[in-house]
């Protein structure tokens, strides 16, 4: 089963500033609660490995999810994929300029390969996008 969540939020910041945050794989990894550790792997910063810990019975250790930004269209769009033995994930972030700043449109799709993965993300994926929103808002508050 595949779980899909679409969520958009308005930000009082220009698209270029939102882009600085959302294109950074480190920022995305830090915002996800089940990512216990991560490493940035490619010289261009397009690849990262997430060590994901899912609170489900059949997964008793962290799962390494190899992620890669497959499309970058500055400062409007980034798409990444992540693959592992337990799940595959695709994330898309589209930045739209508005009269008051920007709107960040997010789409996440998780395809679980183990029992319980889909159920976990069905319950929690929207909350993970809320975490991303809060992290971005904190980052924007700290910028000049």
Image (cartoon, grey):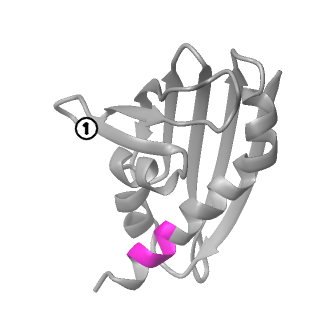
User: How would you rate the neighbour count of disc 1 (Cα within 10 Å): few for under 14, some for 14-19, many for 20 or more?
Assistant: some
The residue depicted at 38 percent of the width and 65 percent of the height is 16
Determine if residue 45 is in view.
yes
Q: Quadrant of residue 55?
A: top right
Quadrant placement of the N terminus: top right
Left or right of residue 123: residue 112: left
The span picked out in magenta is 135-139
Question: Which of these two is toward me, 57 or 73?
Answer: 57
Identify the residue under disc 1. 45
The residue depicted at 37 percent of the width and 44 percent of the height is 25
- Residue 76 on image: x %, y %: 49, 52
Task: Tell me: residue 43, above or below residue 30.
Answer: above
Q: Quadrant of residue 4?
A: top right
- Majority secondary structure in the magenta region: helix
Task: Tell me: residue 68, above or below residue 115.
Answer: below
- Residue 78 on image: x %, y %: 48, 42
Residue 22 belongs to the span the image colors magenta: no
- Residue 93 on image: x %, y %: 56, 48
The residue depicted at 39 percent of the width and 55 percent of the height is 27
Task: Tell me: residue 99, above or below residue 32.
Answer: below
Q: Element at badge 1?
A: loop
């Amino acid at each position: 089963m595949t779980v899909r969540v679409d969520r958009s939020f308005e930000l009082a910041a220009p698209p270029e500033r939102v882009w600085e945050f959302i294109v950074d794989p480190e920022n995305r990894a830090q915002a996800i609660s089940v990512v216990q550790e991560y490493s940035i792997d490619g010289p261009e910063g397009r690849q990262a490995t997430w060590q994901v810990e899912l609170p489900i019975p059949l997964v008793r250790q962290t799962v390494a999810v190899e992620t890669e930004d497959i499309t970058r269209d500055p400062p409007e769009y980034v798409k990444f994929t992540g693959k592992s033995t337990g799940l595959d994930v695709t994330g898309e972030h589209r930045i739209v300029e508005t009269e008051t700043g920007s709107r960040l449109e997010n789409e996440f799709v998780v395809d679980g390969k183990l029992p319980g993965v889909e159920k976990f993300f069905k319950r929690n994926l929207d909350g993970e996008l809320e975490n991303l929103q809060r992290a971005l808002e904190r980052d924007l508050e700290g910028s000049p």
